Image (spheres, rainbow, N blue to C red):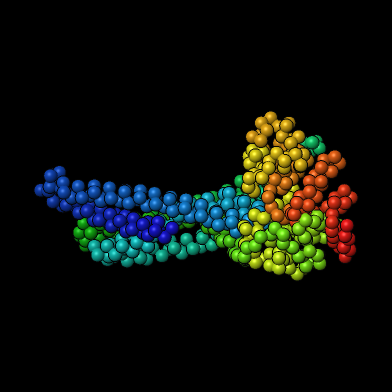
Amino acid sequence: MRRYLAASVLCGVLITAATIASAVVLARVVAGVITDPASRSVTAWLPMLALLAALWTLRFLAQWQQGRLSQRGATAVIAELSAQVLRAVTALPPRRLAAVRDEAATVIGRGLDGLRPFFTGYLPAVFLSGILTPAAVFVIALVDWRSAVIVLIALPLIPIFMILIGLVTRERSAAALAAMTTLQSRLLDLVAGIPTLTALGRAAGSGQRIAELSAAHRRSAMATLRVAFLSALVLELLATLGVALVAVSVGLRLVFGDMTLFAGLAALLLAPEVFWPLRRVGVEFHAAQDGKAAADRALALLQQGASTPSGTRTLDARGAAIHVDSLRADLLPGRVTVLTGPNGCGKSTTLQAILGLASPLSGRVTVAGVDVADLDPTEWWRQLAWLPHRPVLIPGTVRANLELFGPLVDLESACRESGFDDVLAGLPDGLDTLLGRDGVGLSLGQRQRLGLARAFGSAAAVLLLDEPTAHLDAALEARVLAAIAARARAGATVLVVGHRDPVLSIGDHVIRMGADVLADH
């Protein structure tokens, strides 16, 4: 972004030079035509008119190039910041990610788009006010010091009111972003729950609730717009009064012959240019505040992601024992370890600790004596196959979901072992069938089978399966459990979370959390 800002400043210098020079040239031409009747011919003033046209063209081209560079810079910054926030929040532990998910979605999805007015309107206006305003005042002082004094007296009023208005706008922008985050999450939850509400015969009230949420969002947006319009009115009034004072002073002194027509015209043409950049800053400030508030939240999310360090060590998990201090047990290759216990005792958290996504309940998790926290996450995850309680599914084809974490070693065998082959046979386009968000188009049991097929088709040395037979009938459960046991006999390290007797029966080592009981089979 630095080179875009540097180029924008250069464009601002060109705009300033062209603006001041064109005002001086125009004042000279008009004053000459009025005071010197002998020179009232196009030929006499043709060089000056050509210079004036060239200056106006230069100003137009500089403004066009400044806008073009600002748009490119804004696009680059928004894309990079969005990518950084996405990487930071996805690196958070699951519980922390769940806490900031809605906020991150709002910031990335809509909030950071508000930075575009900041880069395309507000920053160029700030640069121009820092260059054009003092330069114009300096030139006015050269041609008429009295007008410069009037401008310097009226000029500070605009920044003072801008600061006061900015304090109000900043609070409103932050509140608007928070309101938008809350309203968006509620609206998405409500829309996602409409099928369930319809099935229960309660969908009639959802329309009214959606209307209420929309009205709340509209009121929040209109409150911000009211402040913007009122502040713009105040700034325009102050700028108009400043120019009017200069015009009155110049007019009176021209009447009494206290100044030349050229000096008066130059002061009058340059006075609006003194106030114009500051007025533009005030107008663009409100449009930029929403983006600035989103950027502040984005930086806060980045700070949260920065507090989650990752290791750099690598190892081969095949044949390595995984020791979990909190379980006082080793997960050994070639064996099925079943983790059971009451809800909330930390079974899923233990799986996440082995993955390196969360801190262990106590002590450490080590692989071949190396702490999981010291392992390079990407390399470690490549050696794991994880089936969470709810398989992760994305909008796209069935094939894309099966290969979400990489190509499968044997797609046909994985689908057969998980029972997903029966599901494929009933899909209209087989592997090319499109699924919606969270696997819309498949039942819960079919989604579970897809997740199992993805795990079975992986060449990972470690399998972490959270309730793998949920939503499956008895016959299919037996087939899946047999495949899990076979995977362990082939040398994989398998950890299964489960409650039902069939799941417990395949365990070589059953760990009952919350009861301090370790049972071996």
Most extreme residue toward the bottom is 363
Q: How many marks?
A: 0
Name the quadrant containing residue 260: bottom left
Residue 150 vs residue 81, the one in the foreground:
81
Name the quadrant containing residue 238: bottom left
Most extreme residue toward the front is 490
Q: In this view of the protein, can residue 279 be seen by the observer?
A: no
Quarter occupied by the C terminus: bottom right
Q: In this view of the protein, can residue 64 be seen by the observer?
A: yes
Q: Position of residue 249 (x, y in %)?
A: 30, 60
Residue 168 vs residue 380, the one in the foreground:
380
Q: Position of residue 337 (x, y in %)?
A: 81, 57
> Viewed as shown, does residue 91 lie left or right of 27?
right
Q: Residue at x 69, y 30 (%)?
A: 428
Residue 46 vs residue 231, the one in the foreground:
46
Q: Residue at x 63, y 60 (%)?
A: 377
Name the quadrant containing residue 146: bottom left
Quarter occupied by the N terminus: bottom left
